[in-house]
Image (cartoon, rainbow, N blue to C red):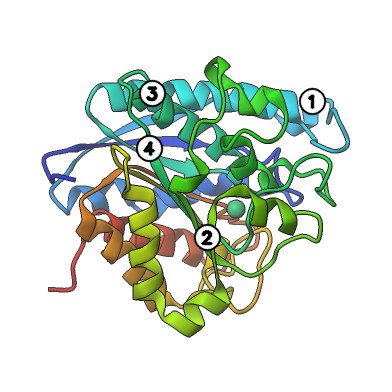
Amino acid sequence: MMRQSTIAIIGAPMDLGAGRRGVDMGPSAIRVANIHSRIASLGYKVEDLGNVAVEQAENSPSGPKRARYLAQIAETCLRLAEKVQRAAGQGKVPLVLGGDHSIAAGSISGIANHFHRRGEKVGVIWVDAHADMNTPQSSPSGNVHGMPLACLIGRGPKQLTHLFGYAPKVDPRNVALVGIRDVDALEAPHVKKSGVRAFTMRDIDEKGLPRVMAEAIDIASTGTAGIHLSFDMDSVDPDEAPGVGTPVRGGITYREAHLAMELLSDTARLVSLEVVEVNPVLDIANRTADLAVELMMSALGKRIL
Ligand SMILES: [Mn+2]
């Protein structure tokens, strides 16, 4: 994308989809890490559109056991989707700050609907330790942050799959999962049958990150108007990103994470992005939020030289 672009920051301070509390403070921690001025230093115009409203867990019935807080999550996702769509319609690049990963059902529905109305579609690169392709039936926890990718390809509760009245929002053939290493037993067959291309940590170990990213970029670009990046901080090794709700050892390294973002930036095909699952309660001196900002800068074109 061009440096003349306006980056529209949108906070989604939601933790209703997560098992552990605290990711609702993620947008604040990322702002405290100076995301606004650091992105502006790359030459972009930056606008902060504030946060979307989120129901407070304390005031809310937790709802269905197999998809806890589903109604409240769907409401927030719709608000977020509308905000993302509006920003994209004004020619801005939405940058969404999570929040638990269930917000991606909103952000991606928003960018997908923006292109859908012009007869175009969007590809997705989903960087994560998990596949996030559970359904209420397969989920061991009932936490909706394990379900958004399934919802976006049309599988899951209608409240999330059918935002704006149709599904799927993305064609699974244009979706690449990168970095997965922890998939639930009943979720694995969903991933295999989905049509989504899943690059596991083993793929990264064997092929190397540059080859994996080249394939992922190809998948998300072919026949699409552009790429949405959904970056879960738990994809990075917990040694570098300790402040996440569901850490899994054996993640991508600090440099691999940056390289993935740099390669994505080289394509100039990013149309929107988000970084999720920063949990300040579990973090060490805001290190994970700081890394989140660094990685977004690399995705937006920061170069070493
Ligand atoms: Mn995730």
Q: Residue at x 46, y 36 (%)?
A: 11
Mark 4 CB within 8 Å of ligand 1: no
Identify residue type, mark 3.
Answer: His
Q: Secondary structure at mark 2?
A: helix
Q: Secondary structure at mark 1?
A: loop
Front position in the image: 159 or 56? 159
Q: Nearer the viewer, mark 4 or mark 2?
A: 4
Q: Disc 3 designates what residue?
A: 116
> Alpha-carbon neighbours of circle 2 within 10 Å: few (<14), some, or many (≥20)?
many
Identify residue type, mark 4.
Answer: Val
Q: Disc 2 designates what residue?
A: 233
Residue 301 seen in the figure: no
Badge number at residue 122: 4
Q: Give the image location of residue 85, x and y in percent.
A: 38, 24
Label located before the other in sequence (4 or 1): 1
Identify residue type, mark 2.
Answer: Met
Q: Residue at x 36, y 61 (%)?
A: 295
Q: Give the image location of residue 124, x and y in percent.
A: 43, 46
Q: Is residue 288 above or below residue 271?
A: below
Q: Is residue 7 above or below residue 192?
A: above
Cα–Cα span, label 4 and label 2: 22 Å
Asked if labels 3 and 2 touch by Cβ distance under 8 angstroms, the answer is: no
Label located before the other in sequence (1 or 3): 1
> Alpha-carbon neighbours of circle 4 within 10 Å: few (<14), some, or many (≥20)?
many
Asked if labels 2 and 1 touch by Cβ distance under 8 angstroms, the answer is: no
Cα–Cα span, label 1 and label 3: 33 Å
> Alpha-carbon neighbours of circle 1 within 10 Å: few (<14), some, or many (≥20)?
few
Cα–Cα span, label 2 and label 3: 28 Å
Q: Disc 1 designates what residue?
A: 60
Instruction: Point out the image quarter for the N terminus.
Output: top left
Residue 219 seen in the figure: yes
Q: Examine the image and state in which quarter residue 167 appears.
A: top right
